[in-house]
Image (tube, rainbow, N blue to C red):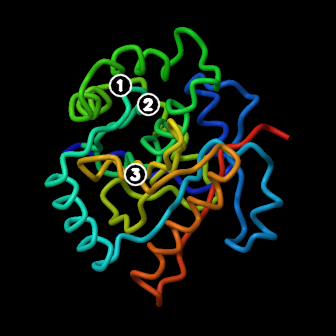
Amino acid sequence: MDVWLPLESNPEVLTNYMVKLGVSPLWSIVDIYGMDDELLDMVPKPVKSLIFLFPCSKAHEEYRAKEDEELKAKNVEHPKSLFFTRQFVHNACGTIAVIHAILNNPDIEIEEGSVLKKYFDGAKDLSPDDRGELLNKNVDLKATHEENAQEGQTATPNINDAVYHHFIAFVEVDGTLYELDGRKNFPVAHGKTTPETLLKDAVQVCKKFIELDPSEVRFTLLGLVPTQ
């Protein structure tokens, strides 16, 4: 499996990254400072996606494997408009979370001929596995990813350093809240939601992640919102 440099959970870096991918500068990534209603109400609206960064603890890995088996047995169908790609590249989860956040919001403009538009045009009619393979071979995506991986506030990590944190995205598609994690075989539906309640509904799911490992504090919440 190929390895990319990990992206930093830095809103400015991720926002610049989206622009380089071809996303309209009318949209930005921002920090979300807590899960209390008062702090969530301060986040600019509408929130198009919640991006969640969490440590891949033993408890999370065991839960992921169990959940994947359950979803496989259920053989759940999802809307064709839902864009989901698998992750077949180590440390590409930041890019995949951004891709899931953007491509499941068709009202967010993507520049024709841009890196992301070319990827979407080639991937939209493929299976999630084939989308992941296409991403793996996309030299423009990799180059843009790694350029931004070196722009964070922390020292650029060695490509072979162990990375314990993982990005996922939550989006609303056809009135359902979806968790999109490229390391899972399937999207995970978490019940009904609306564009207005997406943030608070997704935070409730994130709280369940945290409950799996209550001694852990290294969690980060980011929102895809209109540029202020």
Occupied quadrant, residue 80: top left
Q: Residue at x 81, y 70 (%)?
A: 38
Q: Which residue is mark 1?
A: 139
Left or right of 134 in this view: 146 = right
Percent position of residue 204, x then y:
56, 68
Position of the C terminus by quadrant: top right
* Circles 1 and 2 in contact, beta carbons < 8 Å: yes
Q: Residue at x 30, y 18 (%)?
A: 125
* Circles 3 and 1 in contact, beta carbons < 8 Å: no
The numbered dot on residue 189 is 3
Left or right of 141 in this view: 98 = right
Q: Residue at x 33, y 21 (%)?
A: 123
Callout 1 crowding tier (Cα within 10 Å): few <14, some 14–19, many ≥20: few
Query: Which element carries disc 2, helix, strand or loop?
Result: helix
Residue depth check, mark 3 versus mark 2: number of the one nearer the observer: 3
Occupied quadrant, residue 109: top right
Q: CA distance from mark 3 to mark 2?
A: 32 Å
User: Which amino acid, mark 2?
Assistant: Ala
Q: Residue at x 20, y 68 (%)?
A: 66
Query: Which element carries disc 3, helix, strand or loop?
Result: strand
Query: Which element carries disc 1, helix, strand or loop?
Result: helix
Q: CA distance from mark 3 to mark 1?
A: 32 Å
Q: Is residue 225 above or below residue 79?
A: below
Q: CA distance from mark 1 to mark 2?
A: 6 Å
Occupied quadrant, residue 200: bottom right
Percent position of residue 209, x then y:
44, 72
Q: Which residue is mark 2?
A: 143
